[in-house]
Image (cartoon, rainbow, N blue to C red):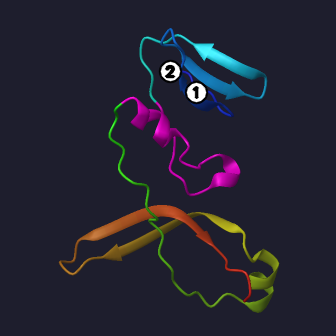
Amino acid sequence: MRFHVQHRWQGWDADGRLVFDTPEGARRVEAAASVLALGGASWPQLGSDGAWAPVLQARGVEVAPLVPSNCGFDIGWSGHFAQRHAGAPIKPVVAHWRDADGKEHALQGDAWLPRPA
C-alpha cells in the first residue's frame, strides 16, 4: 500500500487511469486496485471539501448527501485560554459516555473554540 498526500483525485482519464493534481503537477496512475480515502466536506481549507462526490456520481456511484455531524457544547474555558485560542481546533478530543442502557461509548473528533461574538 502507498499513501499519497497532497494529491487531489480528479477522476479517471480516457484510459481508466486515476488522475491526480499534485504539487508537482498532474499525475496519472494505473492501478490494479485503489482505496480512495477522500474525507468529507468539513475542512475545505485542508482539501476536505467533498469535490470528489460529483466525480463518483457521474460514474453512477450512489453517494449519500454529505451532512454535518457536529454538535455543540459549552465548556467554561478561562478568559485567557478562550481569547488566545479562539477559532482554533483542539485535536484530538475523545468523548466518553454511557447511554440509557448503561452501554459505554467513545468517539474521537475535533473541537473548536468559538470566536467571541
Which region of the structure is painted magenta? 36-59
- The one nearer the camera, 64 or 40, is 64
Question: Is residue 37 among what the camera can see?
Answer: no
CB under 8 Å between discs 2 and 1: yes
The residue type indicated by label 2 comes to Met
Q: Which picture quadrant has residue 59?
A: top left
Residue 63 position, x and y percent, is: 36, 44
Magenta highlight on residue 43: yes
Q: CA distance from mark 2 to mark 1?
A: 7 Å
Looking at the image, residue 115 sits to the left or right of residue 55; the answer is right
Looking at the image, residue 92 sits to the left or right of residue 37; the answer is right
Q: How many numbered discs sit on the rendered protein?
A: 2
- The one nearer the camera, 71 or 49, is 49
Residue 48 position, x and y percent, is: 59, 48
Residue 109 position, x and y percent, is: 51, 62
Residue marked by disc 1: 3
Relative to 17, does residue 59 appear above or below in the rendering? below
Residue 91 position, x and y percent, is: 62, 62
- The one nearer the camera, 93 or 49, is 49
Magenta highlight on residue 14: no
Residue marked by disc 2: 1
